[in-house]
Image (cartoon, grey):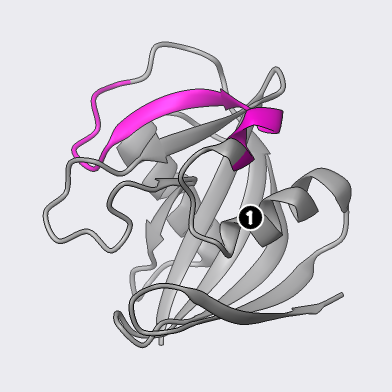
Amino acid sequence: MRLTTLCYAENDGRWLMMHRTKKAADENAGKWIGLGGHMREDESPEECVRREVREEAGLELEGLRLRGILTFILPDWGNELTFLYTARAEDRELPECDEGELRWIRIEEAEKLPLWEGDRIFLPLLRTREDCFSLKLIYAPGGALERWELTP
């Protein structure tokens, strides 16, 4: 199982998101997602998410907070355990990113974007809950969400 991180950095009612449009053979192609990536063997989840946001957006995170553990069951790409974070980040000009277009998105507009179906389950939880949750997302071959299980 792959170990990954995902962060929704916030500034002034907006989340920093990436439209995945540039990477060849990208399982996230065409989708809007938060920033993050794969953990290295010698990293904690917090070190990973800080490194990934720094590499992708040139930003340092403040007030980093673990909000959830996401278990993705993905027959097409392999299963993944993701540490989901929120944080604050400075609003400044964003660099070019080789994985996609970075943009600050109003939080209330995020769910209108092309997203994974599972993201439509956990993004509202980031807005409405303060606790840390566990969410299992089970996808069918081809990428359709079959079912999900939320544990407080």
Q: Which residue is mark 1?
A: 120
Quarter location, residue 135? bottom right
Q: Which amino acid, by three-letter code, is at mark 1?
A: Arg
In percent of the image, x 75 and y 50: which residue is there?
A: 124
The total of numbered circles placed on residues is 1
Where 21 falls versus 97 (above or below)? below
Part of the protein shown in magenta = 95-111
> Quick one: 8 or 148, which is closer to the camera?
148
Q: Is residue 131 magenta?
A: no
Q: Is residue 103 magenta?
A: yes
Where 13 falls versus 107 (above or below)? above
In percent of the image, x 65 and y 71: which residue is there?
A: 69
**Quadrant of the image containing the N terminus:** bottom left
Quarter location, residue 134? bottom right
Q: Is residue 137 left or right of residue 48?
A: right
Return the x and y of residue 48 as percentages of the image width and height.
44, 57
